[in-house]
Amino acid sequence: MDFKLYTSFPEELEAEWNHLLDQSVPHVPFLRHEYLSAWWQTRGGGEWPQIDLALVTARQEGRLVGIAPFFHVPNHQGRPALLPLGAIEISDYLDVVARPADRPAFLSGLLPFLAQAPIPAWQALDFYNLLESSSTLPALEAAARENGWVYRAERLQHSPYIPLPGNWDAYLAGIDKKQRHEIRRKMRRLEENGLPVRWYVVDDSLSLESELEAFIGLMAQDADKRRFLTAAMRDHMRLTARCAYERGCLNLAFLEIGGVKAAGYLSFDYLNRIWVYNSGIDFRFVDLSPGWVLLGYLLRWANEQHFSEFDFMRGDEEYKYRFGAVDRFVMRATVERA
């Protein structure tokens, strides 16, 4: 493999990059070229103000076969490290991009290339947010052993999801009886509250900007999310949502009560799955459980549309499991130079 280092983001690789991602496993929206380009523009919504790009590609006979998008920064332990582009807080799943058959050879060649590449000195590769099923984990361990480096892996976070049966009644039948009753009760209570109720998914490009601002406003009603929503983070969310909309994979849903937006969910509609990215509610309507009800509407719609999975992504909040989510985990893998 012929390896190449990029220290500025390679916008010209978009078509090749996404074509390779289409053949890669795992294939997640956070590895798309346009998403990581947006992440780089805002430095992760301001999470990493001072970083250096160290993005590596590999080719065989001119064909792109591997992408390892890294940046150089002191990690949270203060050690100079290479982290995957997108890490840590706002990109739920990360990895290298390569076909399964090419991944072992790509990682085997990547480590010695990084050891001699003209990038600032580093002590560790710090892979955050790898799905526990990723073949990168065993391939990276083998590559580290081959090069005499030290490999470690640990579970980082819960990442629950709901396999969808494609039928609302079948979905309800598959969850806890008490919870099934609670979902129906809250949906019925809202629908019978006397105020007009509607929910919708944004599909108008002319209203997208105002709808995004309304969603960010709902998020900001929560104190923790308000602190999270710095100016740079708001810019990142706008840029990411617009990019997703332009490529037909934004699912921005609102629940209105009496003509007022009471809850919103920003998700990605990608690869026949719904990937839930963030949410917000108007606390004036909290007694009517608007977030809970909108989630119920989304799950009913996703079943009716025969989506295969409803991915809550990172976080072990109780409500996810009450809606029938099952656990999987994301990992952190580190490779330290001997």
Image: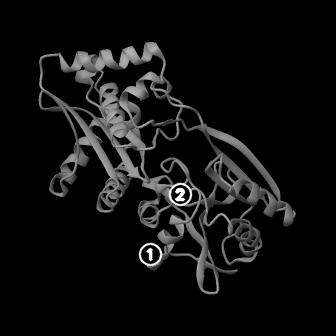
Question: What amino acid type is highlighted by mark number 1?
Answer: Ala
Mark 1 / mark 2, whichever is N-terminal: 1
Near mark 1 (Cα within 10 A), the count class, few <14, some 14-19 or many ≥20, is: few
Q: In the rendered image, which quarter contains the N terminus?
A: bottom right
Q: Residue visible at 59% across and 82% down?
A: 63
Q: Which mark is residue 15?
A: 1
Q: Pointer 2: what residue?
A: 27
Say whether residue 60 is visible: yes
Q: Residue visible at 62% across and 50% down?
A: 130
**Is 245 on the left or on the right of 68, as rendered?**
left
Q: Which mark is residue 304?
A: none
Query: Against 113, is 189 above or below?
Result: above
Give the percent coordinates (x, y) of residue 83.
62, 58
**Is 8 on the left or on the right of 289, as rendered?**
right
Residue at the limit of the structure toward the bottom, as seen here = 61
The picture quadrant where one finds residue 316 is: top right
